[in-house]
Image (cartoon, coloured by chain):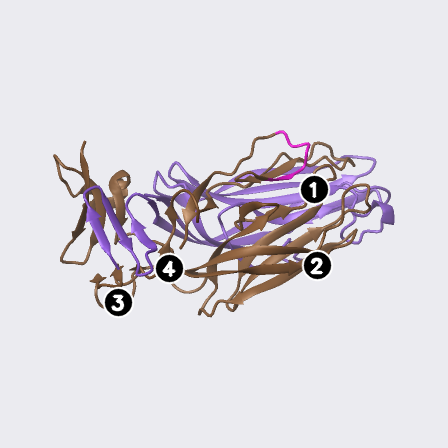
Amino acid sequence: MPLSMSGRKIVITRDDASVAFDTDEGLFTAFDFFEGSLVLPQRQAVSDENGPQTVIDVNIDHAIGSCHPNADTCIGMMRSTWTGIDESVFGSVWTQTCGSYLDMIGFVGQDGDSIANADRYLAPRAFGFYTFRAAGGSFWMNERVAIRAWRPGSPATWTFTRNQCTIDYRIYVGLYV
Amino acid sequence: MTSTMKLKLDKAGKLAIYEVDDAAVDDDPFDDPINNVARLRFHSDLRYPSVIDVRTGTANFAAVGYQQRSVQVATLFAHGLGGTPMVMGQCTLDGYTVPLGGSVPHQISSTGGGFGRWFKLTADVTNVYLRMFAVTPWNTGLASPINAMSVDWKVYVTDFTAEGPAPGLGSDTRHVRMDYHRITARRGAFDTDKAYFRSGTGAGTFPVCKGPTMDCQGFTNPYGNITALPWRFKVNGYVQGVNSYTGAIDAPFTAVKLE
C-alpha cells in the first residue's frame, strides 16, 4: 500500500498497483443525504370520440430540499410503487438514480379494451419518467408525464390513468472534488 | 499561486487532504470543508459511497413477437449482502458502452411510435437483476419485433443499501489506521480496500449521469398518428427515440472510474 506524497500530488496505490486515491482525480463527495417519499397524484386523460380530447402534459419539479450550492450529482436509490393496479413498466423495485427512470409507457389497445385486433398496439398514448436532479443549491425530482386517451372505434369515451404512485428514495447529493 | 497538497490529521481523528498556497498556508478546507470545496480533496467528516464488488457476465433475453408487453428478468448474481444494495452498471449496446442508470431503451422504432425494449438494473435483498421490458407493434408495417439478444454487462455493487440507518461513521474503534497494505479513515467508513467514485479519463471509465437521460415533448396530436409522441434518449453518443423529436437532449455525465 504505497502512499506517495510529492508536493502537488498525493497518491495511494494498492498492493496490486491499482489506484485507491489520487488528488489529481475528482472524488465523489456527498455533502447531503436525503431519505423519504414523494406521493405523486393520479394523472388521467379522458377522451370522447365526438367531444373533447384531454391530453395530459405534466412537467413538474417536486422540491425535496436544499443541498450544497455546487452539488450536481445524485447517487442513490429509488423505487416507484403504484396505488391499486400497478401498470408500471418495471414494478416496485429498487434501482439507482443516475438517469431518467421510465415508469409508464402505454399503447392503444394494450390493456385489453375491445377494439379491433388490427388497432391494438397501433400508436402511443402514455409515457412517463422521473429524474432526480441537483443544481444551484436545490434538490428535486422531475416528473414528466404525457397521456392521451385516444382510441379508435367505439365506445366513444375512454380514459387512461397513471394511478397515484409513491417514490421512495435514499440519495447522496454531492459533487466530484 | 504555487500550491501544495497538505494532509492533516488532528487528535480527534479528523483527517483531510487539501490544496494550500505555499505562500499562505491555511487550514480552511480542514476546518470548513463545505465552504472550501475548490481546494478540498478528502475530508473524513464527509461521506463517500464505495464499491465493494465488481462482476461481469452476459444476460440472455428471448425474442418478443408482435402485439405484446413482455417483462423478462435475468438474475445476474447473488450479492450476499444483508440488504438491498445500490448497484451501478454498464452494458454494451450497438457497440456503445451505455450506463445502466435510469432506464435504457434499445431497438426503438424511430418512425413507428416508440415501440422497442428497455433495460433496467435492479437489486433486492438477495440478487442483482437485469430486467428487460418490451412492447411491440401490431404488424410489420410499424417496426420489427424484438430480437433475441445477449447483453454483456458489468455491475458495481456498493456498500449503500436501501434498508437500515442512514450511512454514517464506520464501527472501527480507531479514527484512522495506516499500515503497509491498507489505510482507513472515518472509523473505517473510508477504506482503501474499497473503490470510490473517481472522475477521470481514458480506459476504465464509464459515464455516470448527473441529469436527465430522456426528454419528451408531449403529444402533438390527441388522435391517431403513430409519431405523435416525440421523445429521445441520449447518453455518450448512444441515441434512441422517435424521429419527430426536435429537442436537444444530451445527458450530462461524469466519466468515472469505479475500480
Q: How far apart are marks 3 and 4 (CA)?
A: 17 Å
**Which comes sooner in the sequence, label 3 or label 4?**
4
Q: Look at label 3 and name its amino acid.
A: Asp
- The reply to whether dot 3 and dot 4 touch (C-beta < 8 Å) is no
| Disc ID at residue B114 | 1
Q: Distance between the residues labelled 2 and 4?
A: 39 Å
Query: Which chain is disc 1 placed on?
Result: B
Q: Quarter holding the N terminus of chain B?
A: top left
Label 2: few (<14), some (14–19) or many (≥20) C-alpha neighbours in 10 Å: few
Q: Distance between the residues labelled 4 and 1?
A: 39 Å
Q: Colour of chain B?
A: brown
User: Mark 2 = which residue?
Assistant: B62
Q: Is the magenta stretch mostly helix, strand or loop?
A: loop
Q: Colour of chain A?
A: purple
Q: How far apart are marks 1 and 2 (CA)?
A: 20 Å
Q: How far apart are marks 3 and 1 (CA)?
A: 52 Å
Secondary element under disc 3, as helix, strand or loop, is: loop
**Which comes sooner in the sequence, label 4 or label 1?**
1
Residues at marks 2 and 4 on the same chain: yes
User: Mark 3 = which residue?
Assistant: B172
Q: Within the magenta stretch, is there residue A150? A: no
User: Mark 4 = which residue?
Assistant: B166
Residue drawn at x 40%, y 55% as measured from the top left? B259
**Which comes sooner in the sequence, label 2 or label 4?**
2
**Which comes sooner in the sequence, label 1 or label 2?**
2
Q: What stretch is highlighted in magenta?
A: B239-246
Q: Look at label 1 and name its amino acid.
A: Gly
Secondary element under disc 4, as helix, strand or loop, is: loop
